[in-house]
Image (cartoon, rainbow, N blue to C red):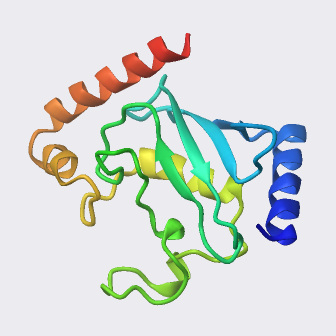
């Protein structure tokens, strides 16, 4: 683990503690490991996820900020851009550079200027506006497009479950 990664992450944690951002909270899973964070995302207002409290882990690589962290929901969540195992699939969490598949511009992918705050705001935005054109969860994307009422019911179950787990 580089001193740069530790310093950057400690500074980001300090800043988030002093100036919390609406919509999520973040902290270390274990005080001895600055590379492992737990975050709680509040379901954004006026979305299907409103009222939910979704927990996730952020695991930072040793060469952060040159590589993006992995973000994985621990709470059950039904979303086209979240793999069935909980891993979040959004452009800024993909390695820097050109997309070998040609779906994303390099400017949409990871950059060392990204912070925990910008990542979390991107995930909140993802919850507000699912991208069913490039899904991580094909079943969720198909249901989003073809059975929106069923999709809403499934998300509502996840929101209720997240509330029960939180309290």
Look at the image and tell me in which quarter the N terminus lies.
bottom right
User: Viewed as shown, does residue 60 lie left or right of 27?
Assistant: left
User: Would residue 18 be found to the left or right of residue 132 on screen?
Assistant: right
Residue at far left of view = 146
Q: Establish if 41 lies above or below 102.
A: above
In front: 13, or 107? 13
User: Residue 66 at what x, y percent from top left?
Assistant: 68, 77
- Residue 122 position by quadrant: bottom right
Q: Going 82% across and 47% down the picture, which residue do you hit?
A: 13
Q: Position of residue 100 (x, y in %)?
A: 35, 88
Q: Quadrant of the C terminus?
A: top right
Q: Residue at x 44, y 31 (%)?
A: 75
* Left or right: 32 in relation to 146: right
Q: Is 90 displayed left or right of 18 in the figure?
A: left
Name the residue nearer the viewer: 21 or 116: 116
For residue 100, above or below residue 92: below
Count of picture labels: 0
Give the vertical position of 89 relative to 29 (above or below): below
Query: Residue 39 at what x, y percent from top left?
Result: 63, 38
Residue 43 versus residue 130 in the image, above or below: above
Percent of width and height locating residue 7:
88, 62
For the point 30% across and 38% down, which residue is it?
A: 78
Q: Quadrant of residue 134?
A: bottom left
């Amino acid at each position: 683990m580089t001193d740069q990664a530790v310093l950057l992450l400690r500074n980001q944690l300090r800043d988030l503690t002093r100036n919390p951002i609406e919509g999520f909270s973040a902290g270390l899973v274990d005080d001895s490991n600055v590379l492992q964070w737990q975050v709680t995302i509040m379901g954004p207002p006026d979305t299907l996820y409103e009222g939910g409290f979704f927990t996730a882990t952020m695991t930072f690589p040793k060469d952060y900020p040159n590589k993006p962290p992995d973000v994985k929901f621990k709470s059950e969540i039904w979303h086209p851009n979240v793999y069935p195992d909980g891993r979040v699939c959004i452009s800024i969490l993909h390695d820097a550079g050109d997309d070998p598949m040609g779906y994303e511009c390099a400017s949409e992918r990871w950059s060392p200027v990204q912070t925990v705050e910008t990542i979390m705001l991107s995930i909140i935005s993802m919850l507000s506006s699912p991208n069913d054109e490039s899904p991580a969860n094909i079943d969720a994307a198909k249901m989003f497009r073809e059975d929106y009422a069923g999709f809403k019911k499934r998300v509502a179950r996840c929101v209720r479950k997240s509330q029960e787990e939180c309290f």
